[in-house]
Image (cartoon, grey):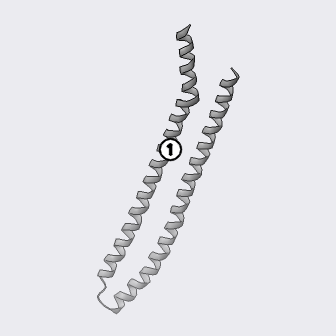
Amino acid sequence: MATKDFDKTTQQFESLFFGPARAYASLAVDYTEQLVKTQMEFTKSYTEASLGQMRAFMSVKDPEGFRSYVEGQQKVAKDMGDMLKVDAEKVVALNRDFMQKSQKLVEDNVKSASKAANQ
């Protein structure tokens, strides 16, 4: 009888506390991994663009080259602005997905707890 009660208590702790905690931790780790990966991709893109511009500037040898460099800067500024917009949208989508999954997890856990409490 004591073993049966212990098993039931263990099962209740698993379903009410440990299972949901593991599920949320897994969700949080996945989100963090995706966010860090996305940020690293951003950093790489911006670094490559910046280094490219530095190299382009170092190759300026005359007024025509300088004019060409300045015109290129305008294109790079536009491209960087476009990249920033896309990158911001990626982060917003990651955050939205994380919030929706978190909310679903909470709803499922509330239903599970309610069901367990009624038994």
Residue name at image x 44 percent, y 75 percent = 76
Q: Give above or below for 44 relative to 10.
A: below
**Place of residue 3 in the rendered image (x, y in percent of width and height, measured from the top left):** 52, 10
Residue name at image x 36 percent, y 88 percent = 66
Q: Quadrant of the N terminus?
A: top right
Check the image and name the residue furthest to the top. 1
Disc tally is 1
Which amino acid lies under the numbered mark 1 shown in the image of this protein? Ala
Residue 55 or 96: which is nearer the viewer? 96
Rendering quarter of residue 39: bottom left
Q: Give above or below for 75 relative to 19.
A: below
**Place of residue 83 in the rendered image (x, y in percent of width and height, measured from the top left):** 49, 67
Q: Secondary structure at mark 1?
A: helix
Rendering quarter of residue 60: bottom left
Circle 1 crowding by C-alpha within 10 Å: few under 14, some 14–19, many from 20:
some
Q: Which residue is mark 1?
A: 28
Residue name at image x 65 percent, y 37 percent = 107
Residue 75 or 15: which is nearer the viewer? 15
Residue name at image x 39 percent, y 70 percent = 49
Check the image and name the residue furthest to the front. 2
